[in-house]
Image: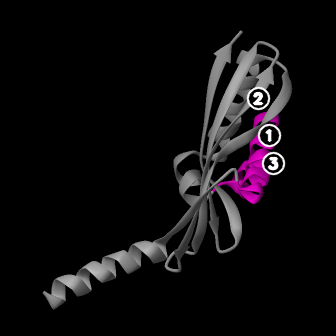
Amino acid sequence: MTFRLTLLLSVVLLAACTFWANKPNDPETVAYVDWVSSDLIATDDPKFYADQAAPELLDKFSAAKFVKMSKLVKQTLGQFIEYHSATGTTRFYNRPVDGVTEAGQYQSSADFAHGTATIDVFVQKINGKWKLYAYYVNMKFD
């Protein structure tokens, strides 16, 4: 009985230490997501992408592939017109093993001459610095 109780308390404590809280539309996370998303959708700069992407993302989706995708979006949807601010949720963590203290899942959109792009962004704050962990663009034509 003591072993089960100790195990249960350990699991609860681990969960409490790993997962602190959810915060919808955290201002710091929204500011980063808006900055990175609007620049990524408006530019073809591989250096900017490489600087902001987490190593795991760069391993799967290189800067050259990013430039190709960005150009395809602009060729398909036309001239970039306006970016609309992100909404989503930030989760606060305490994971000393990998340094992750926050992670966010946000969605924004951008208007183009011939349609709209919806941008889904997943970010992590690792050792005090925000990094882009995943980035998806869905296009809708007018």
Q: What percent of the width, then of the height, locates residue 111?
A: 79, 23
On residue 35, the disc is: 3
Q: What stretch is highlighted in magenta?
A: 26-53
Q: What residue is drawn where x is 71% and y is 56%? A: 26
On the picture, is 33 further left or further right than 62?
Answer: right
SS at badge 3:
helix
x and y, in percent, of residue 19 in the image = 49, 68
| Viewer-closest of 27 and 137 | 27
How far, Cα to Cα, is label 1 from label 3?
A: 6 Å
The residue type indicated by label 3 comes to: Trp
| Picture layout, residue 112 above or below residue 96 | above
Please say which color scheme the image uses. one colour
Q: Do the residues labelled 1 and 3 touch (CB within 8 Å)?
A: yes
Query: Pointer 1: what residue?
Result: 38
The answer to whether residue 72 shows anywhere in this view is no
Where 99 sits versus 81, above or below? below
Q: Are marks 2 and 1 in contact (CB under 8 Å)?
A: yes
Residue type, label 2: Ala
Q: Name the residue under label 2.
A: 110
